[in-house]
């Protein structure tokens, strides 16, 4: 098991609501990335935070936003939830933001939007 | 467009036999290549990566992967499969330029029969 933790483990929301997911990175890691994994698909990159700044973003709309805190933990916020937002949300931490760094994943938060 | 292909949805192999899970990619430059494994209701676990150097990379649990630049492939291999290797395997590619987006394949389910 990695030292990356996520909360909550499961969440049910209704369309139009807002949700906040949390991630605590592995000790010593200053970079956190978030991914959306829909059922039967590979993870899709949402964005990456390095030292509290967003430094990379995938093809997700602005209603997906994030924060990274001074202790390098992170939040993913999704506004105006849509049914298609139902997925497993994974966060991954790494020692640095450079491309060859290994990412260590948390267990994920499973979000269901009704 | 940049992409990662895992051409087999499922690979079936008998315990003790060698296994191969295929991955090809369409990413310019000299990307970084990764393999992850996912067990049911769990996050992704890192297996191995290729950054530079020897084309044969050794990783966790007896897995290895062969990088072939001319064929833009990074196939995962193991000389002798175990029932406990049954899981979902993801190939991932991170471009060496243009940000820190990691592109995942759709995954290959490995089933090892006793």
Image (cartoon, coloured by chain):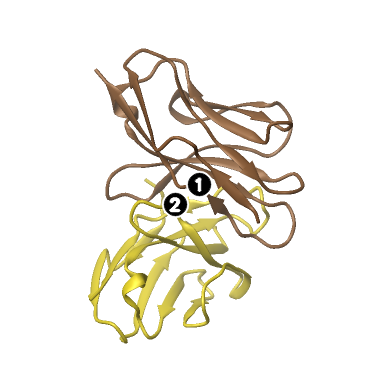
Q: Nearer the viewer, residue B60 or B84?
A: B84
Q: Residues within 10 Å of mark 1 (few under 14, many from 20)?
A: many
Q: Nearer the viewer, residue A88 or A9?
A: A88
> On what subunit does the disc labeled 1 rest?
B
Q: Quadrant of residue A97?
A: bottom right
Q: Is residue A37 above or below residue A73?
A: above
Q: Quadrant of residue A82?
A: bottom left
Query: Marks 1 and 2: in contact by CB < 8 Å?
Result: yes
In 3D space, how far apart are the residues under numbered discs 2 and 1 (Cα atoms)?
Answer: 6 Å
Q: Secondary structure at mark 1?
A: loop
Q: Secondary structure at mark 2?
A: loop
Residue appearing at x 48%, y 26% in the figure = B63
Residue appearing at x 43%, y 16% in the figure = B18
Q: Residues within 10 Å of mark 2 (few under 14, many from 20)?
A: many
Q: Is residue A58 above or below residue B18?
A: below
Chain whose colour in the figure is yellow: A
The disc label shown at residue B54, or none = none
The disc label shown at residue B105, or none = 1
Task: Tell me if A23 is positioned left or right of A55 in this view.
Answer: left
Q: Is residue B20 above or below residue A31?
A: above
Q: Quadrant of residue B112?
A: top left
Q: Which residue is mark 2?
A: A42
Q: Position of residue B6 (x, y in %)?
A: 50, 39
The quadrant of the picture occupied by the C terminus of chain B is top left
Chain whose colour in the figure is brown: B
Residue appearing at x 34%, y 55% in the figure = A107
Q: Position of residue A65 (x, y in %)?
A: 49, 79
- Mark 2 vs mark 1: tell me if same chain: no
> On what subunit does the disc labeled 2 rest?
A
Q: Position of residue B72 (x, y in %)?
A: 67, 36
Task: Tell me if A35 is positioned left or right of A51 in this view.
Answer: left
């Amino acid at each position: 098991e990695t030292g990356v933790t996520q909360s909550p483990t499961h969440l049910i929301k209704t369309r139009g609501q807002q949700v906040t997911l949390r991630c605590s990175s592995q000790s010593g890691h200053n970079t956190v990335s978030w991914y959306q994994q829909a059922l039967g698909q590979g993870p899709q990159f949402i964005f990456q935070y390095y030292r509290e700044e967003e430094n990379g973003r995938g093809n997700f709309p602005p209603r997906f936003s994030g924060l990274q805190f001074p202790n390098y933990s992170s939040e993913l916020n999704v506004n105006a939830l849509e049914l298609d937002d139902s997925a497993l949300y994974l966060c991954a931490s790494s020692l640095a933001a450079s491309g060859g760094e290994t990412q260590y994943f948390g267990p994920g938060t499973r979000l269901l939007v009704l | 467009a940049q992409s990662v292909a895992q051409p087999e949805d499922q690979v079936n192999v008998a315990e003790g036999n060698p296994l191969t899970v295929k991955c090809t990619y369409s990413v310019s430059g000299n990307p970084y290549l990764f393999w992850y494994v996912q067990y049911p209701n769990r996050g992704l676990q890192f297996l191995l990566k290729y950054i530079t150097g020897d084309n044969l990379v050794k990783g966790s649990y007896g897995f290895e992967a062969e990088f072939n630049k001319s064929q833009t492939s990074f196939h995962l291999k193991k000389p002798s499969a175990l029932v406990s290797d049954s899981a979902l395997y993801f190939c991932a590619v991170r471009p060496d330029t243009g940000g820190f987006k990691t592109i995942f394949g759709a995954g290959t389910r490995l089933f090892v029969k006793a």
